[in-house]
């Protein structure tokens, strides 16, 4: 079908990939648009096309997310995703209408909890007792200041303890990035390498599949177990 919704979502995701969006961002957009599509199916039936949704549908979807009790910042992300998709259809595929442009992305003020250096050290101490694997992973996140995805997809060859640097091939907004390793991180990484034989290409392999890196959801699940 020429205006099949799901087919155009796939085109949109490919467009994001070509424009160097991170795998995590693309995955998030895919999940958000799939949920919006399911919402449209409930209203229009199975034959939903990209010509069907309007400004009112986006606002109705926003209301439905509020009723479900979704966090306000998550709702804002969902709406922003739909607006980006709508803009892509209008600008890149010459669709005659951009319903997303008529919807204002909801904005919410988030109160960010800033922890102290002492609290962070306490967190790492608990992580060390929990597992050397997650202790090292948490240390990489802390001492490099990286987002979670670049760390979990790190391959062993990109961590050089001899040159005291790490290479991140895919950082949001940056194509290639070399970063010197903090002295503390060098010690932690060295101990991790000594106690863990390289059975995988990845520095932090999946516990189930050694030829794959650990998943973001799995890391977050375990990090939440640390108490400070």
Image (cartoon, helix red, strand yellow):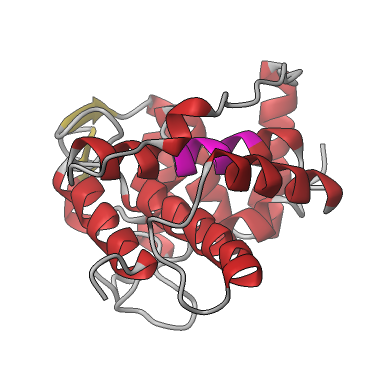
Q: Position of residue 149 (x, y in %)?
A: 40, 48
The residue lying at 46 percent from left, 57 percent from top is: 52
Q: Position of residue 187 (x, y in %)?
A: 41, 39
Q: Is residue 17 above or below residue 88?
A: below
- Residue closest to the eye, 152 or 66: 66
Q: Position of residue 197 (x, y in %)?
A: 33, 71
Q: Position of residue 113 (x, y in %)?
A: 75, 21
Q: Which residues are magenta?
A: 76-83
Is residue 190 visible in the rendered image? The answer is no
Q: Is residue 100 above or below residue 49?
A: above
Q: Quadrant of residue 112?
A: top right
Q: Is residue 122 above or below residue 86?
A: above
- Residue closest to the eye, 43 or 146: 43
Q: Looking at the rendering, in which quadrant would you find the C terminus?
A: top right
Does the magenta stretch mainly form a helix, a strand or a loop? Answer: helix
The residue lying at 46 percent from left, 76 percent from top is: 47
Residue 6 falls left or right of residue 72: left
Is residue 81 visible in the rendered image? The answer is yes
Q: Is residue 67 magenta?
A: no
The residue lying at 52 percent from left, 63 percent from top is: 37
Residue 215 falls left or right of residue 128: left
Q: Looking at the rendering, in which quadrant would you find the N terminus?
A: bottom left
The residue lying at 54 percent from left, 44 percent from top is: 138
Taking the view exactly as shown, the residue that stands out farthest to the bottom is 208
- Residue closest to the eye, 176 or 123: 176
């Amino acid at each position: 079908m020429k205006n099949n919704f799901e087919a155009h979502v796939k085109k949109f995701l490919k467009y994001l990939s070509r424009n160097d969006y991170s795998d995590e961002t693309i995955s998030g957009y895919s999940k958000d648009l799939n949920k919006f599509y399911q919402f449209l199916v409930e209203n229009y039936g199975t034959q939903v096309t990209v010509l069907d949704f309007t400004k009112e549908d986006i606002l109705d979807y926003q209301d439905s997310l509020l009723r479900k009790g979704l966090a306000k910042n998550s709702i804002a992300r969902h709406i922003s995703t739909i607006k980006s998709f709508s803009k892509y259809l209008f600008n890149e595929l010459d669709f005659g209408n951009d319903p997303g442009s008529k919807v204002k992305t909801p904005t919410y003020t988030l109160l960010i909890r800033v922890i102290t250096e002492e609290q962070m050290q306490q967190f790492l101490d608990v992580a060390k007792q929990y597992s050397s694997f997650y202790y090292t992973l948490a240390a990489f996140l802390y001492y490099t200041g990286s987002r979670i995805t670049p760390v979990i997809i790190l391959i062993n060859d990109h961590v050089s303890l001899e040159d005291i640097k790490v290479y991140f091939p895919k950082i949001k907004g940056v194509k290639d990035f070399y970063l010197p390793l903090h002295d503390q991180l060098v010690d932690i990484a060295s101990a991790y390498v000594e106690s863990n034989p390289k059975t995988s290409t990845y520095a932090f392999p999946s516990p189930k599949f050694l030829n794959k890196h650990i998943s973001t959801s799995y890391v977050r699940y375990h990090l939440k177990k640390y108490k400070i």
